[in-house]
Image (cartoon, rainbow, N blue to C red):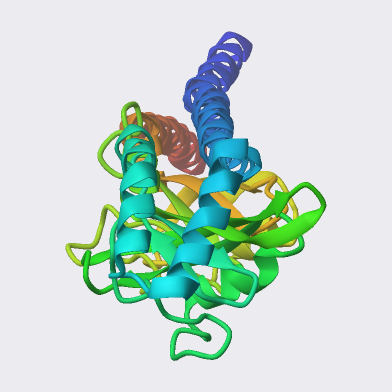
Amino acid sequence: MNTKKVFITIGIAFSIFLMTLPLVSYKFLKNAVEAEAFNHLVTVRELLKYQVEGYFHERFGDVDVLARNPVTGQGFSRLSKAFHASGLDGPQYTKIAGLYQPLMKHYLNDYGYVNIFFVDKNGDVVFSAVREAFTGTNLLTGRFKQFSIGQVFARGFDGVAFEDYTWHEEMQEFTSYFAAPIYDGQMLLGVLVIEIPFSHLNAIMTKRAGLGETGEMYLVGGDGYMRSNSRFSEQPTMLQKEVDTEATREALNGIVGKKIIKDYRGVPVLSAYTALDLKFVNWALMVEIDEAEAFAAVNKVERRVTILGSLIAGITILYIYLVNRRKNQQILAESLEESKT
């Protein structure tokens, strides 16, 4: 009898071991998979942060260098005088513009700018590499005063300035502006403005290699609207989609982190987030992947562990039931024997 009890005890202990081992192993597996997934997202986030910041720092440097170039200053001065003497279509202006147009077109083609503007200190747009509605107007008194180009011009007197993306109707694309003051020695001549397309930034943000079927990278501005396009939307979300999640709020407040949250679609995701280190904008960078995809392998193991645990538990319960039933039958039989005697 004692031997049977020993075997029963060993059997129960072994069954409990078989039930708990997969559960413990699953917990460690899930933690390992989660850590690996977050490490990958953080790596992608840091590389992307470096690329985006590098792109804007390059544009910042471009406009500053171009504004300080003596050739630019000389051309600016000559074009301004010709503009005020004869207007955009006068022979004097046309001749001088013809000298500097190839150089400015070179910058457009080489750097992919949309346009380059010379705006004198009185607000007159005295030159543009590509003539458009702004050319020849006044940004201090004219109808474009409140437009992005007017805003960046006003701030360009104090140093290199940036104006956020807005819709460019003629190009059918979003564009943004950088501006820098132009001097002739100590004398302020005006402001140089370059216009850049959203397509440059979009090309950086749409490289999703290694992020699976649901991984995405996107930017959110301080106003809560996207500064990139969502992979889950057929329509552009740039400056159209408002995003307010736990991660974006923390990132816009300067917090660098990673956690599982519900994204702007209401879907649980693993999110790695940070603010961009750019003095002229307050943007959050998000790198995310759906929790279901990140934990797909773990969820498969979980289903198998659940089935295995259920089978072991069922067998254990059945074994205990049969052992108890047999024991009760023996006790009942012994009682009947005693009552007969």
Residue at 33%, 41% in the rendered image: 112
User: Residue 133 location in percent, x, y?
Assistant: 31, 76
Residue 182 is left or right of residue 50, and the answer is: right
170 vs 25, nearest the viewer = 170
Q: Position of residue 210 (x, y in %)?
A: 34, 26
Residue 262 appears in the rendering: no
Q: Is residue 34 left or right of residue 303?
A: right
Which residue occupies the foreground of this view, 334 or 86?
86
Q: Is residue 81 above or below residue 328?
A: below
Q: Horizontal and vertical percent for residue 283?
A: 60, 58
Residue located 59% across and 57% down the image: 179
Q: Residue at image x 66%, y 41%?
A: 68
Q: Is residue 190 shown above or below 110?
A: below
Q: Residue furthest right?
A: 186
Residue drawn at 17 percent across, 62 percent down: 234
Please tell me which residue lies in front, 281 or 225.
Answer: 281
Query: Which one is nearer the viewer's eye here, 59 or 174?
Result: 59
Instruction: Report the side of 281 relative to 174 (left or right).
Output: right
